[in-house]
Image (cartoon, rainbow, N blue to C red):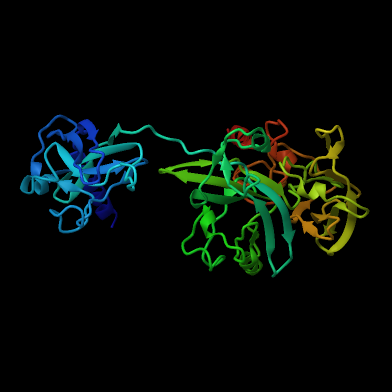
């Protein structure tokens, strides 16, 4: 069997080495008749040699493909080209050698142009690619373009606004309130639009609603996929850009909000939330094959609880500080009993050993001169039992009576008197290849209980790929 695979590999290598690759087309240009019934055509020269300058063995096997704008393959339709029996994307020499009208040796006619009032099939450039079919083995040249019209960039849509977030709990679902940038007349707008422009009478771009879409992002810029299972009345195929034209007043995605009801029910079944601390929205505008996008606007929903830090035999640091752009939770910390509540649970007994109301750690001064809190906080949990394992999480209580809980983190404290050695990531009192494996898993995002102090091998107060390199050097050095 091994010999068979080696022989097959050798044959594949040999066939690739002998494959004939046609040279790139030259003299590419476009003539536009500016009339629908005119004779617009693409002019070109297909060299009769390969990339090495050798003559092609059989010219009848030389052909071409046409591409438009962003490498979009053009289809020659039989309903438009009477010489074709069926739709084709590759036109070979034997076709135009025997027909000789629409397809010629140095030009091809097109019957749809960019004249006003007709649907264009390209907006700024058209190109051609040579293809050679050598007994079923096809090879292609590079695509050679000619720019016909100026490449117009679509306007940048205004940034959307996240207005609210409601977590109804399982299995009811969640609701995300949003608003796309509009003027006072309800027109969707772009090109860095501000309200001041409306008052000053300056012009701004009004966007065509049919060309607007938006995407949802979760946690670390992870794009969300809308599926039929989650949104059966509005989505047929999975998509990451939801068209505004599909928004309905009473559907899962309405004019002002998105209901993730079915999604939350699915989450209940698999016990895996689709985001853990923040959610964002981005607006897109697509015109003429080009797409421009707004900024991603985020809202922090649940506390971003990080793994335990500064671990000792009797304490650890709980940290859920972050740099979210929109402090939705902070803005609702109004009234007594609101704020961050840190819960620490002894894993063995499932008894709560701490419930602490923690004020936001940092503050800033707003544009009116008021001191306001920044999202997140830190808290040093002390007085714990050496060697015990603890689970901890943060609950946000708002003046809306809603509560929002972070993910649950877990930490095992070392036995009393146990020291910390840099590189002992799994804290088993040895530095070896298992520590390298655990550290790589952590850096790549896998969840696990590691000693973060020990994992900061360099040390630079951060755990990243540089620590992996330092740890590998340390393990290899100890092995010598």
The residue nearer to you, when weighing 446 against 349, is: 446
Report which quarter residue 100 is drawn in.
top left
Q: Position of residue 58 (x, y in %)?
A: 8, 42
Quadrant for residue 201, please give it.
top right
Task: Give the x, y percent position of residue 25.
Answer: 20, 33
Counting the numbered discs, the total is 0
Q: Residue 423 in the image: x percent, y percent?
A: 68, 38
Using the image as rendered, state which of residue 405 and residue 291 is in the foreground.
Answer: 291
Rendered-image quadrant of the C terminus: top right
The quarter in which the N terminus is drawn is bottom left
Q: Residue furthest right?
A: 336
Taking the image as drawn, is residue 466 in sight? yes
Eyeballing the image, is 251 above or below 11?
A: below
* Direction from residue 264 to residue 374 in the image, left or right: right
From this viewpoint, which residue is outermost toward the front? 201
At horizontal 54% and vertical 59% (from top left) the residue drawn is: 226
Q: Looking at the image, which is closer to me, 286 or 120?
A: 120
Could you tell whether 151 is left or right of 167 in the image?
left
Q: Quadrant of residue 125?
A: top left
Residue 414 visible from this viewpoint: no
Residue 3: x %, y % from top left: 26, 53
Seen at 78% across and 57% down, the residue is 404
- Tell me: 466 left or right of 34: right
Which residue: 78% across, 52% down? 412
């Amino acid at each position: 069997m091994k010999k068979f695979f080696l022989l097959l590999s050798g044959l594949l290598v040999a066939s690739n080495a002998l494959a004939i690759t046609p040279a790139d087309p030259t003299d590419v240009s476009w003539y536009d008749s500016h009339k629908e019934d005119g004779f617009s055509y693409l002019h070109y020269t297909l060299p009769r040699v390969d990339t090495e300058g050798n003559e092609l063995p059989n010219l009848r096997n030389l052909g071409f493909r046409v591409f438009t704008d962003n490498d979009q393959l053009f289809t020659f339709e039989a309903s438009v080209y009477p010489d074709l029996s069926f739709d084709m994307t590759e036109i070979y020499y034997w076709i135009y050698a025997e027909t000789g009208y629409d397809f010629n040796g140095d030009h091809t006619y097109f019957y749809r142009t960019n004249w006003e009032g007709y649907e264009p099939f390209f907006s700024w450039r058209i190109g051609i690619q040579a293809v050679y079919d050598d007994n079923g083995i096809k090879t292609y040249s590079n695509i050679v373009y000619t720019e016909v019209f100026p490449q117009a960039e679509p306007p940048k849509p205004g940034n959307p606004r996240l207005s609210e977030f409601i977590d109804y709990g399982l299995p009811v679902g969640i609701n995300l309130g949003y608003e796309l940038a509009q003027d006072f007349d309800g027109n969707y707008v772009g090109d860095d639009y501000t309200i001041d422009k409306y008052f000053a009478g300056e012009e701004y771009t009004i966007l065509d609603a049919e060309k607007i879409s938006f995407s949802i992002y979760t946690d670390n810029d992870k794009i969300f996929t809308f599926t039929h299972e989650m949104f059966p009345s509005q989505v047929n195929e999975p998509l990451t850009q939801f068209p505004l034209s599909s928004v309905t007043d009473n559907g899962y995605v309405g004019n002002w909000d998105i209901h993730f009801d079915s999604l939350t029910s699915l989450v209940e079944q698999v016990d895996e939330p689709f985001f853990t601390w923040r959610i964002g929205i981005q607006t897109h505008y697509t015109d003429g094959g080009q797409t421009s996008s707004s900024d991603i606007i985020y809202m922090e929903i649940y506390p971003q609880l990080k793994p335990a830090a500064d671990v000792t035999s009797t304490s650890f640091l709980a940290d859920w500080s972050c740099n979210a752009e929109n402090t939705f939770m902070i803005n609702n910390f109004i009234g007594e009993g609101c704020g961050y509540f840190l819960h620490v649970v002894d894993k063995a007994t499932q008894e709560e050993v701490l419930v602490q109301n923690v004020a936001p750690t940092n503050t800033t001064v707003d544009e009116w001169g008021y001191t306001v809190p920044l999202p997140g906080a830190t808290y040093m949990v002390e007085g714990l039992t050496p060697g015990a394992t603890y689970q901890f999480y943060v609950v946000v209580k708002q003046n809306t009576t809603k509560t929002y809980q972070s993910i649950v983190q877990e930490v095992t404290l070392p036995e009393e008197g146990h020291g910390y050695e840099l590189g002992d990531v799994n804290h088993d009192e040895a530095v070896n290849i298992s520590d390298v494996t655990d550290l790589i898993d952590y850096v790549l995002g896998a969840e696990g209980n590691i000693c973060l102090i020990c994992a900061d091998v360099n040390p630079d107060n951060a755990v990243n790929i540089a620590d992996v390199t330092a740890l590998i050097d340390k393990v290899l050095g100890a092995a010598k």
